[in-house]
Amino acid sequence: MSTECKLLAKIWCSPTPTTPSAKALHTACLSYLESVKLPTSYSSTELRTLESLPAEIQYQIIGNLGFTNHFYNATIPAPTPTNEELRELILATESEIYAMRKQLLACNNCLRLQHVSKFRDTQTRGKRVRDGPQRHLRLCLQCAIWKGWYRLGKFVQVGGEDVYICRCRRATPKANLPPNWLTHKRCADCYSKNGKIAEGYNHGIDGTDASGEGTRRTRDLYFHLGSRHADF
């Protein structure tokens, strides 16, 4: 008879434990014995180890261990937290001394701690301040932009300064906008990219002449759809 059969047979003959966890394990062992029709009486002084048990029994045991060896530590699957659990954790973290010293706040969409300069002023005041009753609704600037909270082509206040929300969904401080931004209503990056596109079309990349018709079509399309790049 194999070692695991010997051990299981001994468990079969042992009295039922009183503690709930041990009782559940004992019941599982008995169920296993009944399923494989092992003998119900056996006595032996041979050395038995945890690894000698069937895998089903091992999993029942190691799941209740406070600590174990490297093999079982790698075998036990790590718990996967839900988004709600991560949100609770990140909100609790923003109340730590380190987060307060570094002026970090939690975003409830990307679930990251970010500096207050990455949030619109309305997200860092009132009920959405640190430890505020609505802190679980706070979003950083980029997450709020991509969720459609702010209108593209408009300004929002960040740290008391105007920040322009371009159609490419890039947030640019007003001081960093190109001199002619009022004409094109685009950020410096969009204006630079559109200028390169226009230059390419003027040189006949798409087979059009230098009349500018292809350039105008491309510019209008780019201004309408925008880019998905954002790095504010």
Image (cartoon, rainbow, N blue to C red):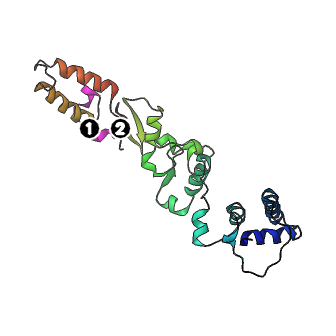
- Mark number displayed over residue 189: 1
Q: Residue 103 or 82: which is nearer the viewer?
A: 82
| Residue with the most extreme bottom position | 45
| In the image: residue 64, left or right of residue 129 | right
Q: Residue 109 or 116: which is nearer the viewer?
A: 109
Residue 49 position within the rendered picture, expressed as x and y whole percent measured from the top left = 69, 75
Q: Are marks 2 and 1 in contact (CB under 8 Å)?
A: yes
**Of the residues under marks 2 and 1, which one precedes in the sequence?**
2
Q: CA distance from mark 2 to mark 1?
A: 9 Å
Q: Residue at x 69, y 72 (%)?
A: 50
43 to 21, vertically: above or below:
below
Residue 41 position within the rendered picture, expressed as x and y whole percent measured from the top left = 86, 71
Residue 81 position within the rendered picture, expressed as x and y whole percent measured from the top left = 60, 52
**Few, some or many C-alpha atoms within 10 Å of disc 2 (few <14, some 14-19, many ≥20)?**
many
| In the image: residue 170, left or right of residue 220 | right
Q: Which residue is mark 2?
A: 170
Q: Is residue 181 magenta?
A: yes
| In the image: residue 174, left or right of residue 214 | right
**Few, some or many C-alpha atoms within 10 Å of disc 1 (few <14, some 14-19, many ≥20)?**
some
Q: Secondary structure at mark 2?
A: loop
Residue kind at label 1, given as amino acid type: Asp
Q: To which quarter of the image does residue 190 belong? A: top left
98 to 7, vertically: above or below:
above
Quarter of the image with the C terminus is top left
Q: Which residues are magenta?
A: 165-187
Q: Residue at x 23, y 34 (%)?
A: 193
